Structures are given as C-alpha cells and as structure tokens.
Amino acid sequence: MVGGTEVGQYGDTTVRAVEDFQAARGLRATGSCDTATWLALVEASWRLGDRLLHLSAPNMRGDDVSELQGALARLGFDCGRVDGILGPATVHALTDFQRNCGLPADSVCGPDTVRALDMLTRQSGSGPGVATLRELESLTSARRTLGDLRIVIGQFGGLSALTRQLARALRQRSATVAPTDEPDASAQAATANRFAATVYVGFEARAEPTSTVCYYAVPTFESVGGRSLAEALRRDLAGGGIDVGVHGMRLPVLRETRMPAVLCTIGPVQRVIDATPSIVECAVRALETWADSPLTTPDTYPPTHPPTNPPTHPPTNPDTHRDT
C-alpha cells in the first residue's frame, strides 16, 4: 500500500510495494518499474468479464486471459499452458466450449460465455487441468534418449562460449541442437517454438555469487517437465560444486516457450568462465537423465522459496507476441 506523504514520490514505500508486486508475479524484485513490471501491472488490472476477449494481433494478454485458460483447462478444453496470452489454441478451446454449451460459437468471450464458465467451473473442482495432463502425456508417451531431443540453448550476457561448448557436447551425443544469442527473451522463445524444440535451456550470468534455475509456474499452472529438468540441473550442478536454488517464475522466455524450459542464472561472470567445462558436463548429464526419466515425484522436491534477487534478462518487447 502506497500513501501518506509519499503520494507523488517514488520513495521507499513505493519501492517496497513494487518489489512485493514483482515477487508475486514471478519477476525480478528490483523495486524499479521497468518495462516488464509495467506490462505486468497492466495485465494484473484485468479480470474475466471486464472486456471482450478475442483473437487479435498482437495477442491480448492479461489476468482475465489466464482466468479463461484456467477455467477451460479444468473443464477439459485444451488451450495449451496457462500463460495469459490469447492465441489461436485458446480461441479454438473457447469456440469448442461455446459449441458444447449451446452458445453461439463466435470465438469471443463475452458476458454469456463468462456466466457459463462460472457456473460450470463451480461444479468442476480444482484439478490440474488438461494442459498439465497433456504435458505429462507428451513426456511419458514414448521412451527417449538424449539423442531424441531437439534442444534450443540460449544465453544472455556474454555466455556464448558456454553455450557453444554445450551445443558441441550435446551434438556429440546425437542431440539436435540450435543455439540462439538473441538479446530479447521473446525472440529466443520464438526461436524455440519455430524449431519445435523438445526443451529450451537458457543461461545468464549475474554479478552476485548466487545461482538459480527457474522454470515456468503461475498460481494456476506449473510446467511439470520444466520443474523436473530444473531439479535435475540443481542436483548435477550441486555435485559440481555450484549451489543452486530452484524457483517457479513467470519470466518472458519461460512464459512464451511452448515446451518445458529452464533458465540457469549463475554468477559471478568469472566464476562461470572458470567453471565452464564443469557446467557443460553437469548440463549434459542432467539432460540425459531428464530424457530418460522426464518426471520427478513432487514429494521428492525440497521446499522452494522466492529468490532474494531473482534472475534478470532483457525486458520483453511489448509489441512481440506469440501464438499459444
């Protein structure tokens, strides 16, 4: 809450409020209202029913879209992951829902559709939703090896030597690999989507001597494959002498990829350079383990806590969008 003598000033109370908002939204808690934070503030202002939801370019984004996706998923209509981005998959699921409910299948979420969703979701319980089940099915439907994976490896901030060595090591194990050095997080996600990657692995350096592995998670959805890979990386990096925390985040590169994705943040930079061979070895081993066994029993996870200084990356471009 911001008020009192600080109205009209960006003082300590405002900074703390922004930090709290950023942490709650899975963003880097800097206290500065950067582009990603402002866009998140705008998205958080929408509630389902506040506006008509329909396919547009760029795709509509907001908490109302997340509410729509979550409701459709719990009712068994597959709109993909709950990412708050209204793309073709969400519209297809919405149209399917309208048709099944005897509503005009106009692909627009208006008052009648919202009322039908509200009535049915109150009777449907709170299961994981079809998006989670689809991801589980895709991960377990066939036995895989490292050589079966299509991997996009990204980097932010001068870690191209690390990603080149990792790409070379993975290719030696017969994996299909596409590195990307795009500075924009959304552009890296788009590259992974076009490549039809099995998994995305990103790296960035930080000034502080702390390390994290992040995967996509919001209150109504968690990427089970992303979390499992994050845990595999944590275990192997810890075995290599790098203490790593695991966190569910809503960072753009994790949000906009359609496949399990992780972002590894390791610091400081010199430490990453010195430890590159060890990091490469650990990453290959973790991906090999994940390919063979892509799911980990949730009960085996250690408790996770919001990072005190979550990872950073270039702000997403507000005009960049993806199709869900």
Image (tube, grey):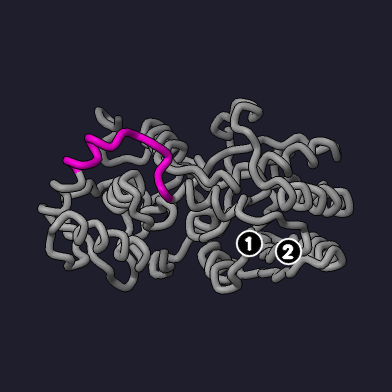
Compared with residue 146, is residue 305 higher up or lower down, i.e. above or below?
A: above
- Range of magenta residues: 118-130
Residue 148: numbered disc: 2
Q: Is residue 139 left or right of residue 86?
A: right
Q: Are marks 1 and 2 in contact (CB under 8 Å)?
A: yes
As rendered, which of 264 and 135 lies closer to the eye? 135
As rendered, which of 102 and 83 lies closer to the eye? 102
Residue placed under numbered mark 1 in the picture: 198
Q: Is residue 11 left or right of residue 238?
A: left
Identify the residue at image location x=68%, y=49%: 264
Identify the residue at image location x=78%, y=63%: 147
Residue 249 position within the rendered picture, expressed as x and y whole percent measured from the top left? 52, 44
Amino acid type, mark 2 = Asp
Question: Can residue 295 be seen here?
Answer: yes
Answer with the quarter of the image where residue 191 lies: bottom right
Identify the residue at image location x=67%, y=65%: 152
What is the CA distance from the residue labelled 1 to the residue labelled 2?
Answer: 9 Å
Tell whether position 81 is magenta. Answer: no
- Counting the numbered discs, the total is 2
Question: Can residue 270 be seen here?
Answer: no
Residue 144 position within the rendered picture, expressed as x and y whole percent measured from the top left? 72, 57
Amino acid type, mark 1 = Thr
Q: Quadrant of the N terminus?
A: top left
Element type at mark 2? helix
Q: Is residue 1 left or right of residue 313?
A: left
Label 1, residues with CA under 10 Å away: few <14, some 14-19, many ≥20: many
Label 2, residues with CA under 10 Å away: few <14, some 14-19, many ≥20: some
